[in-house]
Amino acid sequence: MEERLADELRAHADSDREFVERAFRLVVRRGPEPAALERALAVLADGTLSRAAFMLELTSSAEFARIRLLDDAVAIGLAARRRGERITSHFAPPRTDERVVEIPWVLSRLRPSGRVLEIGYAYAEPAYLAALIRSGVELVGVDLATRDVEGMETVVADVRKLPFEDGSVDQALLVSTLEHVGSDNSVYGLPVERDGRARVRALRELRRVLSPDGRLLVTVPLGEPGDYGWFRQEDEEGWMRLFEKGWLEVEESETYELTRDGWCPSPAFEAEGVRYGQRGPAASAVLCAELRPGPRRSLVPWPRGPRDAAARDEPAGPASL
Ligand SMILES: C[S@@+](CC[C@H](N)C(=O)[O-])C[C@H]1O[C@@H](n2cnc3c(N)ncnc32)[C@H](O)[C@@H]1O
């Protein structure tokens, strides 16, 4: 039989139910909810929609639009990584959240191999996790919340107290996670905290586990400093101060802001009056930075005792974090 005809016959060989389930998994990458399945079967049965029209409806949905944005972000990041290029001065569509900038920025800087921690993976975008899993690195997801992810080692741990040896990590990724450490994380099923020193503790702990040539890729919301309860936003100076207090040095950093025309690089970003959620669905601006271990700066002598115990339990040094 002619191949074109065989394909057409195959396209109609399954039941409407099988077709709807397959279409949902292919387009929106999940099965249909019961009500959506029932409605789809009804419109296919009464001829309101053909199978082709049903596919068009699915691909025209807001859900698919977001899947496409994230797929684009991943594809751009991975293609740059393959070419050995770092994404800089990136532009992304308007009315979107910051992942469209953060994901390509981070993926283009992902090492070719080595031990990589993804901190805060439990609520990460599936497309981003899938890209990391396929990337060839020795990936470990770390989060206080639990989420099983096939193909990825996962560890339930606090970023302030990591179960890894000193200097054992090549790269750590924190995509929109640092700002949440020590805040009210009940939205993620975690206890409420109000620990203003937590972010510096996290940074010092990450510095401890990084190898001397290891790097931390961090993305955080940028704008007028403020405590939003479930996270804390800083301006660029504020984040830089925290990195320094975390004994990390900035190797590279870029700021982006969301404008009416979309996300664009913003080297002279003015944080005053810029609130989270003001310009779009989430951050109004974002800082992307690559950090390397820096010298420990201490105004008072280090307490005696094993070096890692001091760093693990109480990041000593100056009392103020
Ligand atoms: C906004 S979500 C992260 C988003 C995600 N990284 C992404 O790529 O979309 C914040 C995450 O931080 C995790 N988290 C908060 N405090 C933590 C802590 N102290 N240690 C480890 N994970 C923490 C939460 O459970 C949550 O998964």
Image: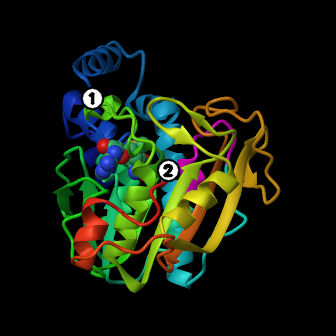
Q: In this view, does 279 lie to the left or right of 213?
A: right
Identify the secondary structure beneath mark 2: helix
Cα–Cα gap, marks 2 and 1: 20 Å
Q: Main secondary structure of the magenta part?
A: loop
Is residue 94 one of those drawn in magenta? yes
Picture residue at 29% right of the left edge, 54% below the top: 6
Q: What residue type is labelled 1?
A: Pro
Task: Look at mark 1 in the image and give the residue it sits on.
Answer: 32
Q: Work out whether mark 2 precedes mark 1 in sequence or the reverse, and give the earlier one.
A: 1
Image spot of residue 156 (x, y percent): 18, 53
Instruction: Determine if residue 149 is in view.
Output: yes
Looking at the image, which is closer to me, 244 or 156? 244
- Residue 78 screen position, x and y as percent: 49, 71
Q: Position of residue 129 (x, y in %)?
A: 34, 57
Reading the image, the residue beneath label 2 is 70
Task: Choose between 42 and 276: the one closer to the eye.
Answer: 276
82 to the left or right of 169: right
Count of numbered circles in the view:
2
Location of residue 17 with respect to 120 vertically, above or below: above
Q: Which residues are the magenta region?
A: 93-102
> Mark 2 against mark 1, which lies toward the viewer?
2
Local secondary structure at mark 1 = loop
The crowd level at tag 1 (other Cα within 10 Å; few <14, some 14-19, many 20+) is some
Q: Where residue 184 sits in the image (x, y, percent)?
A: 37, 32
Mark 2 residue type: Leu
Q: Residues within 10 Å of mark 2 (few under 14, many from 20)?
A: many
At 65% from the left edge and 32% from the top edge, which residue is drawn? 280
Which one is in front, 31 or 269? 269
